[in-house]
Image (spheres, helix red, strand yellow):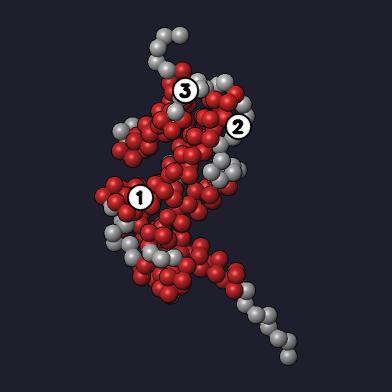
Amino acid sequence: MVKKPAPDATRRSEKSRRAIYAAALALVGEVGYPKTTVEGIAARAGVGKQTIYRWWGSKADVLLEAFLDLGEQTAREAGQEPYAIPDTGDLAADLKAVLRATVDELLDPRFDVPARALTAEGVVNEQLGREFVAKLLEPQLQLYVDRLRSAQDSGAVRPGIDPRIALELFVSPLAQRWLQRTAPISHAYTDTLIDYALHGLAPR
């Protein structure tokens, strides 16, 4: 009698993890953060509740990790390095490329729906808001800081500019327009934001 190989626990765990990510993001988009529960995620993913608690401490932990993973997947599908800003020596071109990719991500329903749910909840749920900023937003914003500092070193940006404030000239308007739906977001829009941020509004 041929002995069957033992099941690959690593593969099974990864399959369960992927199912949990998908279930968490789908639920938060459908019913909102307050009504999303660990029990609901587990049932939708087809796993036991204890499986989720073995890997994560709360539904917030599940959702934030799932959201981070989604961003990495989206970047890979687009042929980009997750959470990376290129440094080609052309600051405007590099920033435009990243913001164009961000627009594509924000217009993707897989990203848009859970992102809106988590962002909206983070406004009224202080603890979730802090975690959302610390785990998701700040690491991404730091990449802009690093790229702008590199531009300062090369002389493309004035030495006295505060990179953390400067990045808000193009990141914040995009975030506001997307979240509040004040107008469409597009590549042309983000290209213009970069031009205005880098060259200002005064006559040239």
Residue drawn where x is 55% and y is 66% of the image: 14
Q: Which residue is mark 3?
A: 160
> Is residue 185 visible from the viewing direction of this image?
no
Sequence-first tag of 2 and 3: 2
Sequence-first tag of 2 and 1: 2
Residue at the top extreme, as displayed = 204
Sequence-first tag of 1 and 3: 1
Q: Which residue is mark 2?
A: 87
Side (left or right) of 177 relative to 158: left
Dot 3: few (<14), some (14–19), or many (≥20) neighbours within 10 Å? few
Q: Amino acid at mark 1?
A: Arg
Q: CA distance from mark 1 to mark 3?
A: 29 Å
Side (left or right) of 106 relative to 154: left
**Residue 40 or residue 194, whichever sits in front:** 194
Assign the N terminus to one quadrant of the image: bottom right
Q: Which mark is residue 130?
A: 1
Residue drawn where x is 57% and y is 21% of the image: 155
Give how far across and how far down residue 174 sits, in percent.
39, 34
Give how far across and how far down residue 9 sits, in percent.
59, 74
Quadrant of the rendered structure where residue 180 is? top left
Residue at the left extreme, as displayed = 124
Residue drawn where x is 68% and y is 83% of the image: 4
Mark 3 element type: loop
Q: Amino acid at mark 3?
A: Gly
Give how far across and how far down residue 33 sits, in percent.
32, 57
Instruction: Name the front one of labels 2 and 3.
Output: 3
Mark 1 element type: helix
> Is residue 99 visible from the viewing direction of this image?
yes
Residue drawn where x is 53% and y is 43% of the image: 83
Give how far across and how far down residue 106 sits, in percent.
43, 42
